[in-house]
């Protein structure tokens, strides 16, 4: 039996963090990963034969390298697997370039940031830039401490991010707009400012900005899209935003317009939450979670 690092969607095969099967080189490693991806997929394309963005992800099953929040690794991995992607959870500096080299996209999340992570994030992000694959930043709790502020500044100075996703407080901090926060959470939902925050982040960092909340705002250049799907349970579970970052990264690996890909990721995510919450056997967040994971696998 082969043991593969991180979380891989192998039928009947358990997976462990950072454990490897014996391979001769990166090409063999990548071929093994591809060969073990999910075998069952939804019928794609309908009568027109044209796949939408969600269907493209499920056909491609992109390999996403996560350097992410330790609290949410399991939830993120299972959510991305259900959605149709393939996650790697690896944060060791000495393998950061190799992991980013075999990945289809990179997600950087500073939720449980420690000093060695920063170097690994920069290496993985720069490798993604060199290869022209998407790299997404989730600046979790950036406004909470000087340490996080300095780390984010260093990341922006060294990596060009395809997209930056955060709650209103996190994103407002990136462009020096006053916003009330508590710890890593945004608690001021002044909706009149959301579009301005998204546009300013997009302009300042030359990126695609995603401001999440009761209403999500996606901006790129002067283009803005607004999403109102979702459910309040997403605000009451740990890691909902972190998993969304993973799904956004997966959607950005498709051959689609970037702002459209991100909008579809956010819209579908909220729609899945609504679907799970509407079930008669969901009574709160505890029963919501497994059904939400299931809903991420549904066909639109």
Image: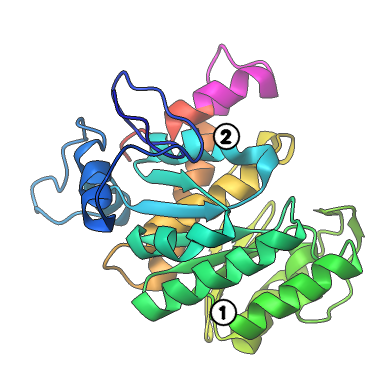
- The magenta segment is 276-291
Residue placed at 30% from the left, 62% from the top? Answer: 254
* Residue at horizontal 26 percent and vertical 55 percent from the top: 25
Q: Nearer the viewer, residue 171 or 217?
A: 171
Residue 178 magenta: no
Query: Is residue 151 something that shows in the picture?
Result: yes
> Circle 1 is placed at which residue position?
159
> Horizontal placement of 265 versus 274: left or right?
left
Q: Residue at x 63, y 42 (%)?
A: 240
Q: CA distance from mark 2 to mark 1?
A: 26 Å
Location of mark 2 (residue) = 75
Q: Is residue 214 above or below residue 255?
A: above
Which callout, 2 or 1, points at the residue further toward the start of the chain? 2
Quadrant of the image containing the N terminus: top left
What label sits on residue 85 in the rendered view? none
Q: Looking at the image, how many numbered discs can be counted on the residues?
A: 2
Helix, strand or loop under label 2: helix
Location of residue 41 in the rendering, given as x and y in whole percent from the top left corner = 21, 35
């Amino acid at each position: 039996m082969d043991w593969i690092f991180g979380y891989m969607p192998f039928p009947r095969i358990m997976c462990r963090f950072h454990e490897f099967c014996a391979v001769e080189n990166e090409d063999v490693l990548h071929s093994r990963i591809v060969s073990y991806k999910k075998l069952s997929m939804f019928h794609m394309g309908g009568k027109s034969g044209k796949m939408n963005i969600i269907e493209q992800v499920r056909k491609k099953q992109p390999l996403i390298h996560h350097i992410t929040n330790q609290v949410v690794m399991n939830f993120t991995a299972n959510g991305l697997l259900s959605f149709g992607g393939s996650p790697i959870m690896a944060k060791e500096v000495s393998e950061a370039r190799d992991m980013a080299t075999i990945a289809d996209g990179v997600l950087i999340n500073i939720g449980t940031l420690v000093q060695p992570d920063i170097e690994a994030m920069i290496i993985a992000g720069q490798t993604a830039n060199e290869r022209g694959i998407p790299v997404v930043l989730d600046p979790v709790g950036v406004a909470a401490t000087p340490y996080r502020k300095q780390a984010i500044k260093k990341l922006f100075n060294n990596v060009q991010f395809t997209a930056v996703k955060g709650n209103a407080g996190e994103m407002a901090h990136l462009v020096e707009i006053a916003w009330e926060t508590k710890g890593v959470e945004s608690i001021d939902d002044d909706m009149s400012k959301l579009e301005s925050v998204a546009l300013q982040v997009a302009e300042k960092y030359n990126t695609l900005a995603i401001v999440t909340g009761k209403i999500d705002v996606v901006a790129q250049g002067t283009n803005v899209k607004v999403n109102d799907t979702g459910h309040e349970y997403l605000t009451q579970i740990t890691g909902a935003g972190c998993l969304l970052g993973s799904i956004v990264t997966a959607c950005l690996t498709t051959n689609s317009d970037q702002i459209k890909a991100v909008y579809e990721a956010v819209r579908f995510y909220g729609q899945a939450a609504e679907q799970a919450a509407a079930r008669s056997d969901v009574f709160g967040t505890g029963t919501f979670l497994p059904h939400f994971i299931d809903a991420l696998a549904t066909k639109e």
